């Protein structure tokens, strides 16, 4: 368990971890997010949503700078997470800020698609 | 009707055929192998095409096609056929995934590919599918739409009995071309 109480993911080719910074959460995804870790990522993001709510977080930062690739099933996990935030009353909404890098070409297109889906909730930096 | 694509090496288009290359990979569509194949495609096209964004479009397409096979194919054999042909305007890249699947999945593929071919805005349809499938945890429903929207590839489908061939292709203009 980490200080967030969220079980990290440690797969052969993928890792996800989280930490608390002030009242906000920082999530770090690294490696290769594909079909093999889809169920684990779903579970991880449900926990992130729960902890963000209990902290009263204004923002969850998601560092994907060392995430080589994300498949559509894992992108869908992020879409489901966004929908969970949208279903809450507006006072409980928090923002998702992706920390990206232009060096990973999937990020430019895929994160742009996510930010267009919920521009009020999702931002992409980098 | 799903759009039918010409055979992989059809040269009747109004352009001068030039040398290219192609390869077939016959693989077990095990989810553990898919990223390995994507990296192989990526490294191959890095040498041939060079442009990193184009390489992403090709390797992502290979990945999403193979995941479709991993989720829905019957049996252990899937064929990924990749070809790159030099044409006057640049390179024409084609990826074709062939495998056996169920009649129900063939119907879903046909519907989705028809929907993608009918739209004039692949990105808008991709967003619409994200909204439509938001709460469905069992199936992403996004892979083929991603190929069109993010990969800017066109899709086609051929069916023979229980065997399906999903074909994707795109023209990659020469560097510096308008």
Image (cartoon, coloured by chain):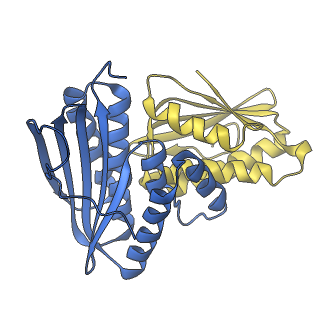
Chain colours: A yellow, B blue
Q: Is residue B109 above or below residue A54?
A: below
Q: Is residue B38 above or below residue A100?
A: below
Identify the residue at image location x=84%, y=52%. Answer: A88
Left or right: A56 in relation to B129: right
Q: Nearer the viewer, residue B155 or A124?
A: B155
Q: Quadrant of residue A13?
A: top left
Q: Residue B88 in the image: x percent, y percent?
A: 19, 31
Q: Residue A112 in the image: x percent, y percent?
A: 59, 35
Q: Nearer the viewer, residue B112 or B47?
A: B112
State which quarter of the image contains the C terminus of chain A.
top right
Left or right: B71 in relation to B81: right
Q: Residue B24 in the image: x percent, y percent?
A: 14, 53
Identify the residue at image location x=42%, y=80%. Answer: B104
State which quarter of the image contains the N terminus of chain A.
top right
Q: Residue furthest left?
A: B19
Q: Is residue B109 above or below residue A32?
A: below
Q: Residue A92 in the image: x percent, y percent?
A: 87, 44
Q: Quadrant of residue A26?
A: top right
Query: How many marks are shown on the rendered structure?
Result: 0
Q: Nearer the viewer, residue B45 or B177?
A: B177
Identify the residue at image location x=27%, y=59%. Answer: B5
Left or right: B97 in relation to A110: left
Q: Quadrant of residue B173?
A: top left
Q: Residue furthest top?
A: B176
């Amino acid at each position: 368990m980490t200080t967030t109480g969220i079980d990290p993911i440690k797969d052969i080719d993928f890792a996800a971890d989280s930490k608390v910074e002030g009242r906000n959460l920082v999530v770090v995804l690294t490696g290769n997010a594909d079909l093999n870790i889809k169920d684990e990522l779903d579970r991880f993001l449900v926990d992130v949503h729960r902890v963000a709510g209990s902290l009263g977080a204004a923002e969850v930062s998601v560092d994907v700078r060392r995430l080589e690739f994300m498949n559509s099933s894992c992108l869908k996990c992020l879409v489901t997470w966004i929908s969970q935030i949208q279903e809450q009353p507006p006072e409980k909404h928090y923002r998702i800020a992706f920390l990206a890098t232009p060096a990973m070409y999937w990020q430019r297109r895929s994160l742009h698609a996510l930010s267009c889906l919920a521009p009020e909730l999702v931002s992409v930096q980098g | 009707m799903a759009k039918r694509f010409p055979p992989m090496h059809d040269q009747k288009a109004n352009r001068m055929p030039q040398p290219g290359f192609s390869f077939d990979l016959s693989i077990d569509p095990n989810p553990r192998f898919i990223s390995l194949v994507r990296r192989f495609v990526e490294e191959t096209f890095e040498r041939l095409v060079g442009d990193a964004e184009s390489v992403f479009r090709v390797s992502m397409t290979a990945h999403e096609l193979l995941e479709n096979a991993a989720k829905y194919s019957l049996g252990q054999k899937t064929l990924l056929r990749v070809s790159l042909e030099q044409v006057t305007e640049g390179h024409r890249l084609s990826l074709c995934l062939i495998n056996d699947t169920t009649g129900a999945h063939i119907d879903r593929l046909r519907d989705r590919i028809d929907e993608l071919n009918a739209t004039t805005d692949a990105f808008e349809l991709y967003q619409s599918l994200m909204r439509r499938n938001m709460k469905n945890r069992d199936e992403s429903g996004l892979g083929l739409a991603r190929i069109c929207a993010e990969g800017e590839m066109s899709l086609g489908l051929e069916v023979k009995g229980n065997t399906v061939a999903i074909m994707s292709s795109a023209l990659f203009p020469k560097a510096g071309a308008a």
